[in-house]
Amino acid sequence: MSNFKQNLEKYAELAVKVGVNVQPGQTLVVNTTLDGAEFVRLVAKKAYEVGAKNVVVNWNDDELNRIKYDMAPDEVFTEYPEHRAKELIQLAKEGAAFMSIVSSSPDLLKGVKTERIANFQKAAGTALKEYRQMAQSDKVSWTVIAVPSQGWADMVFPNEPKEERVSKLWDAIFAATRTTEDNPVEAWEKHDQKLHEKVDYLNEKKYTKLHYKAPGTDITVELPKGHLWVGAGSINEKGHEFMANMPTEEVFTVPLKTGVNGTVSSTKPLSYGGNIIDKFSITFENGRIVSFQAEEGEEVLKKLIETDEGSHYLGEIALVPHQSPISESNILFFNTLFDENASNHFAIGSAYAFCLEGGKKMTQEQLEENGLNESLTHVDFMIGSAEMDIDGVTEDGKSEAIFRNGNWAF
């Protein structure tokens, strides 16, 4: 068996056993583009091997999507197929596990009218609200992983011969997900443990706020009472572990919705809605975005912020050391799944209920009363660098170093 085939097998096994951790009798739902076809067949085999009842695959095609955005009438982008939303919600209620395989070119929709993209993001967010809330409170197991496409590989490795780019991107994905280790499943268990040490330290400290300083960034983020730091593995309501993102290098929590003040600058491009937003800064007052600017994709950023009222606020803050495997690979992936795991980041939009004590069992109203943000969207953007310092402020007002020069200070 070739090295590539071997790694692909190991990657599929990781996705099934560690990513969604498929249980006997469980249905696995896979959302993928056609670029993932070979990999999805392997995933299905691995899932059935561990006792899955059914593997349901929802296929997408990037070229068809582009044709639709270029040629379909405007009104089609204000609708989301109700039957698809109902199917996802029904499957989630029945305890299915969900795997999303990302592979689209980061600028797939470049040049498409921003209204069309914004309208569809909003329609999808509205239709899938119930499903998203189930995922964000760990009711179901879910994971996001990646496979290369030619369009994506062309952006990541423009200086390599065209025919070598996809295999180079495969190598980078295998390395980032620990697939190349002798026993990847065991490697992930160790990695999970390491991240939990940081989580335990931060949860013990119960900081009231964090202060971030870096070139172009000076921002204070208050944390709600009862906030919880989490990292790596999550646990669904049946008590089964899963890994929501592969790769993952972050530990994260929720900000107090109205407690963000100052300006933050991006340190990596953000691929959102098939477009690139780059070199941007955002200013917050009492949690709300009051101004922003971007050298590239400003109109797309504007539409993102205007999705709804909640998209004017943050829903997540995450810590990732500059000295981490993806950061040290020096590869800019133009894909948030990877780039957010090379850099500290914030997320515009909805908060994760599981980042609050008792949050998994709270209603939306109770979560909001506790200072958590609600929105139709959740979009991470990267703010970390080797020049970033972060201080945590304790209950009694003492400032302690959390990050110095982009890395853990404890």
Image (tube, rainbow, N blue to C red):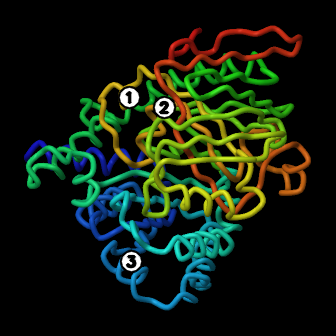
Q: Are marks 3 and 2 in contact (CB under 8 Å)?
A: no
- Residue identified by numbered label 2: 343
- Residue identified by numbered label 3: 65
Upstream in sequence: badge 1 or badge 2 = 1
Residue 376: image quadrant is bottom right
Q: Position of residue 358 (x, y in %)?
A: 82, 41
Left or right: 258 as drawn, with respect to 386: right
Q: Secondary structure at mark 1?
A: helix
- Residue identified by numbered label 1: 327
Q: Position of residue 406 (x, y in %)?
A: 51, 18
Amino acid type for the residue under numbered disc 3: Asn
Q: Are marks 3 and 1 in contact (CB under 8 Å)?
A: no
Q: CA distance from mark 1 to mark 2?
A: 7 Å
Q: Are marks 1 and 2 in contact (CB under 8 Å)?
A: yes
- Front position in the image: 281 or 371: 281
Q: Secondary structure at mark 2?
A: loop
Q: Position of residue 64 (x, y in %)?
A: 34, 80
Amino acid type for the residue under numbered disc 1: Ser
Upstream in sequence: badge 3 or badge 1 = 3
- Front position in the image: 94 or 32: 32
* Residue at the (55%, 80%) spot, across then down: 84
**Crowding near the residue tagged with mark 3, few <14, some 14–19, many ≥20 C-alpha atoms within 10 Å:** few
Q: Position of residue 264 (x, y in %)?
A: 63, 34
**Crowding near the residue tagged with mark 2, few <14, some 14–19, many ≥20 C-alpha atoms within 10 Å:** many
* Residue at the (28%, 35%) spot, across then down: 175
Q: Secondary structure at mark 3?
A: helix
Position of residue 138 relative to residue 249, above or below, is below
Position of residue 144 relative to residue 127, above or below, is above
Amino acid type for the residue under numbered disc 2: Ser
Left or right: 82 as drawn, with respect to 167: right
